[in-house]
Image: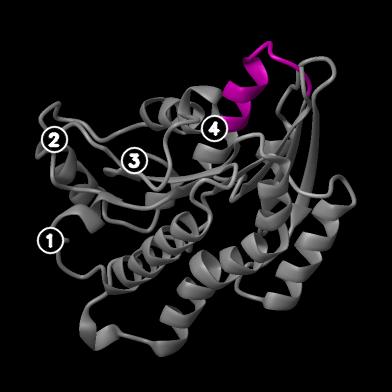
């Protein structure tokens, strides 16, 4: 089977770790994981890979375009272009009222989620398309984009809305060109991404869910896995609603 090369942006997140673990457990050929992290890679280094699979950790602050260029150069030492790209990276989630709005904060969020990703797609998407092998791109959005968002999530929603626009544009430009570009919009996920949020708010969102709980990585990772698989070869430009019918999401 062909070697698969996964570039995972935000791989040091709980979702990133869980995704690598799940992909690594598959017996379908060699996999190379190029795992991006910003500041902490200890969890990545603890991952036990199956024989033959490889993991390379690459550090970059995605709000710094020169570091994004360095990340691209590091990836190119391993391949001309990845076969699979997953974009999970985002700033830690915080609630923000309009009176607390900061242009610098918004710009940083957009750089991390949108500008850096556009630069990475510019570097690799043309080569992925030339292979004509149904390479895959999967982007993490939010179900906040699927309905009226809650209060005080200005930075987060604006950044994700801009990212959705980028995904839609890339999907339109590359339709029928051998790459499947899709996104998921999950509800609130119990990960360290929520560490700056009052636990009472997190619990309140859980209570509003039909199952009286928030999502876990185990709920979300299989959906990403599907979008990265050959089973999704006919799916392009989709933004999957990954909720259990509840309204709260991040």
Magenta residues, as a range?
A: 19-30
How far across and down, in percent of the image, does residue 208 sit?
9, 40
Residues under numbered marks 2 and 1 in contact, where contact means CB atoms less than 8 Å apart: no
Pair 3/1: label in front: 1
User: Could you tell me how far apart the alpha carbons at marks 3 and 1 are, in whole angstroms?
Assistant: 18 Å
In-front residue for pair 108/175: 175
Number of the label disc, if any, that sits on residue 228: 4
Q: Earlier in the sequence, mark 2 or mark 1?
A: 1
User: Could you tell me how far apart the alpha carbons at marks 4 and 3 are, in whole angstroms?
Assistant: 20 Å
Number of the label disc, if any, that sits on residue 148: 1
User: Could you tell me how far apart the alpha carbons at marks 2 and 1 are, in whole angstroms?
Assistant: 14 Å
Q: Is residue 40 visible?
A: no
Residues under numbered marks 3 and 1 in contact, where contact means CB atoms less than 8 Å apart: no
Q: Which residue is mark 2?
A: 245
Q: Earlier in the sequence, mark 4 or mark 3?
A: 3
Q: Taking 72 as reference, is 122 left or right?
A: left
Farthest residue in the front direction?
176
Q: Earlier in the sequence, mark 3 or mark 1?
A: 1
Pair 4/3: label in front: 4
């Amino acid at each position: 089977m062909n070697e698969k090369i996964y570039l995972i942006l935000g791989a040091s997140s709980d979702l990133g770790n869980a995704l690598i673990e799940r992909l690594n457990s598959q017996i379908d050929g060699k996999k190379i994981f190029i795992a991006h992290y910003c500041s902490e890679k200890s969890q990545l280094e603890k991952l036990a890979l199956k024989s033959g699979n490889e993991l390379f950790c690459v550090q970059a602050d995605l709000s710094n375009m020169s570091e994004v260029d360095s990340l691209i150069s590091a990836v190119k030492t391993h391949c001309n272009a990845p076969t699979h790209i997953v974009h999970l990276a985002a700033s830690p989630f915080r609630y923000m009222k309009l009176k607390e709005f900061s242009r610098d904060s918004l710009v940083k969020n957009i750089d991390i989620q949108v500008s850096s990703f556009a630069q990475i797609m510019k570097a690799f998407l043309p080569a992925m398309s030339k292979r004509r092998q149904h390479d895959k791109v999967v982007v993490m959005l939010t179900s906040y984009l699927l309905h009226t968002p809650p209060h005080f999530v200005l930075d987060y929603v604006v950044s994700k809305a801009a990212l959705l626009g980028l995904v839609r544009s890339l999907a339109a430009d590359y339709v029928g060109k051998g790459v499947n570009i899709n996104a998921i919009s999950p509800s609130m996920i119990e990960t360290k991404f929520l560490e700056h949020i009052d636990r009472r708010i997190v619990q309140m969102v859980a209570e509003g869910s039909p199952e009286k709980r928030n999502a876990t990585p185990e709920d979300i990772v299989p959906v990403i896995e599907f979008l990265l698989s050959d089973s999704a070869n006919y799916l392009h430009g989709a933004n999957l609603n990954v909720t259990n019918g509840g309204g709260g999401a991040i």
